[in-house]
Each structure stands twice: as structure tokens, then as C-alpha cells.
Image (cartoon, rainbow, N blue to C red):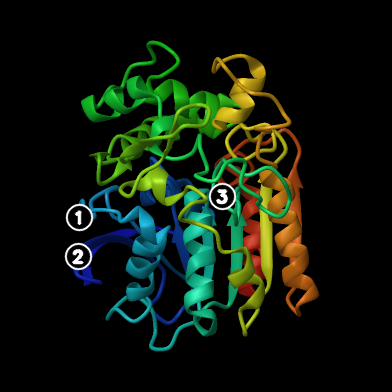
Amino acid sequence: MRSARITVQANGITQAVRVAGPPDGVPVLLVHGNVSSSAFWEPLLARLPETLRVVAPDLRGYGETDTAPVDATRGLDDFADDVAALLDAPGLFAPGARPVVAGHSLGGGVAMRLLVGHPERVAGLLLEAPVSPYGFGGTRDLDGTPTTPDFAGTGAGGANPDFVARLAAGDRSADGPTSPRAVLRAAYVADPASLGDDEDLLLESMLTTATGDDNYPGTAVASPHWPGTAAGPRGVLNALAPAHFRLADELVAVPVKPPVTWVRGDADVIVSDTSLFDLAYLGRLGVVPGWPGDGECPPQPMVGQARAVLDRYAAAGGTYREVVLPGCGHSPHLERPAEFVAELLALAGENATG
């Protein structure tokens, strides 16, 4: 497929959107993850059949969409509302379309939020390495129990300031572990060779991230609990924090339950029960000093939480499949595209050849 770039006025902002395929094709909505943009889907589009109608927006503060502020106290609702507004925007989908929604990482949380808010508009959900239904960090068990009353150790205070500065400066080098290129190679995929000729495209996508208090990473507040910081009210990482984003019960209770496919790599270092971006796990490793131990602050069981919530979803009348790709990291659609395409087309009711 070949995509075109258009702009749409929806939910009060100008949104940049990639579209591909005929307007009356089988509808698919792709929602990118954090520190990226819709360009992260370009390598996938080349593998999809022309029978699909694909819509892939840049979320607010990414790509070419307006740098609108993110109210973290709404969780990921600002993003979900933007995406929901596209469902009926003229020229994107056929009227009344019910797309299969695929969300990567943060985009998986947005996709879950979209399902909760508009269950009748979602034909299927493909969650690619999604954030836990209990948010990112700060919880201790499969029920999402807080490690501290204020979910200490979550939100913008956990961002690496040098990485943020390099994003803001448009650093394209591979100098040091906190350069965006180095992070792309080390954290977004398990095997950097899988990036191939798309590496520069993906890096440029990362560098479109709007940085600051209202976007990435957001504001942090002090906490009396280790490690001394908690989620503030503004910005992306705070919107992902469990103080603001917790939808497990709502997801299980949706009255219309489309099929869910959960695709993840077993070598993911971002969304993992041993995540290198979870301050509690870094504390256990000795990277963040003063860690109070597993009794007070265990690492978040992100994968176990997602499975427990999806088991509840199935018990309440829904269905889901967990697809685990050995040796794959955080971006299966880049690292194992054939398997990812097969799962997407299965949800869309298409065969591999279209």
C-alpha cells in the first residue's frame, strides 16, 4: 500500500493523518506509540493488501499534528478523544465504519480507551506490546494494587533528562546510550538489524516528539516515598501513570466485546515484568539507589496484569488470543512483520493475499 498525508480538523485540533487504500475498503485504524508518530507504521503499510482502508493519525504532540497539551489527569482520554473524532471525520472511513483498531505501546492504551468509550465502533482490537490496563509502574500485583498511596516512581520524574534534551535538540547521532538513535536500536527492537533501511525514517519520527511540561515527558511532583517523585497533572508520561490511567474494570465491563489479539515479543524491555523503564526494577538492579526492596516496591508485573485483565474480559463474554513472538522486542510490526500482518488480517477478516 502507498499512503497519502492529509490534515483533518477534529476534536478542536488539526490532526495529520496517513491514509491508504480505497475509502470503502475494510477499515483499519492504526495508533502509534510514545516517542514516535504514524511514520512508524510505514514499513507495515507496504505489506498490507489494497483491499484495506487504513487510517493512521499522528497523536497530539507527535508528527505533524498540533502540539496540543495533554491533561494527564484524564489518563489517555485526550488522545482517545482525538482518535474517536476521526471515526466520523469526512473522507477517512465510510459512514458508520467499525474499524479494527491496532495500538502499539501507548497506542494500545489509547485503543483500549477507545473501546471503553465507543465499544459499538470497534470491530476488533490488536494490542501490540500495550501498556498495562493498570498504567505504567507503581503497582505491585495482578490486581494493580498501588505500591504507595501516590504511585511513587511513576510519571515524568522517571524520564531520562538527557534523552529528553537530545529529542528536543534533534540529535541524530548514535553517541551515548541516551541518544534517540541508540534508544531506538536498544529498546524499540530486540535486534537492531531488523530496522534495516527504515532506521532513519523511524528516527525522524521519534524526533517529531514535542517536549515540555504539556507533552513529553510532562510535569513531576515530589513524593515522600522512594524514589521521591510521582506523577504530575500534565504531559504524556503522567497520562500513562496509574494515578490517572486505570481502566481494567471498565474494559471488562464493556457491553460490546469485540475479539482481542494481544501480540508481544518475549524480549521486550519496555513493557515487561522486568522492564528497564520501571524504576522499581531498576532499583532492584541497583541502577536507582535507595530501593526499599521487593516487600515495599516490587517491579510491576506488566505482562501478568494484561493477561489477568484479558482473562476477565474473556470470562465476561469476550475472546482474546495471546501471541508471543520468541526473540522479538517491543515492536513486532517492525521485527516480525509477517506474523503481525497475519494477525491483523485475521481480525479484519482478510486473507494474507487480500
Crowd rating for badge 1 (residues with CA inside 10 Å; few <14, some 14–19, many 20+):
some
Q: Which mark is residue 13?
A: 2
Q: Is residue 273 above or below residue 25?
A: above
Residue placed most toward the observer, 257 or 29: 257
| Left or right: 48 in relation to 63 | right
Q: Are marks 3 and 2 in contact (CB under 8 Å)?
A: no
Which percent across, then down, holds residue 259? 68, 73
Q: Amino acid at mark 3?
A: Val
Q: Is residue 351 visible?
A: no
- As drawn, the residue found furthest toward the bottom would be 96
In the image, what residue occupies the spot 57% across and 47% down? 333
**Residue depth check, mark 3 versus mark 2: number of the one nearer the observer:** 3
Helix or strand or loop: what does disc 1 sit on?
loop
**Residue depth check, mark 1 versus mark 3: number of the one nearer the observer:** 3
Which percent across, then down, holds residue 222? 38, 33
Q: Amino acid at mark 1?
A: Asp
In the image, what residue occupies the spot 20% across and 55% down? 66
Q: Is residue 78 visible?
A: yes
Q: Looking at the rendering, which quadrant does residue 274 occupy? A: top right
Q: Amino acid at mark 2?
A: Ile
Crowd rating for badge 2 (residues with CA inside 10 Å; few <14, some 14–19, many 20+):
some
How far apart in space, not on screen, are marks 1 and 3 (Cα)? 24 Å
Residue placed most toward the observer, 244 or 47: 244
Q: Is residue 200 above or below residue 61?
A: above
| Left or right: 122 in relation to 15 | right
Q: Which residue is mark 1?
A: 66
In the image, what residue occupies the spot 32% across and 67% down? 82
Q: Are marks 1 and 2 in contact (CB under 8 Å)?
A: yes
Label 1 or label 2, whichever comes before in sequence order: 2
Q: Which mark is residue 131?
A: 3
Q: Looking at the rendering, which quadrant does residue 89 occupy? A: bottom left
| Left or right: 259 in relation to 34 | right
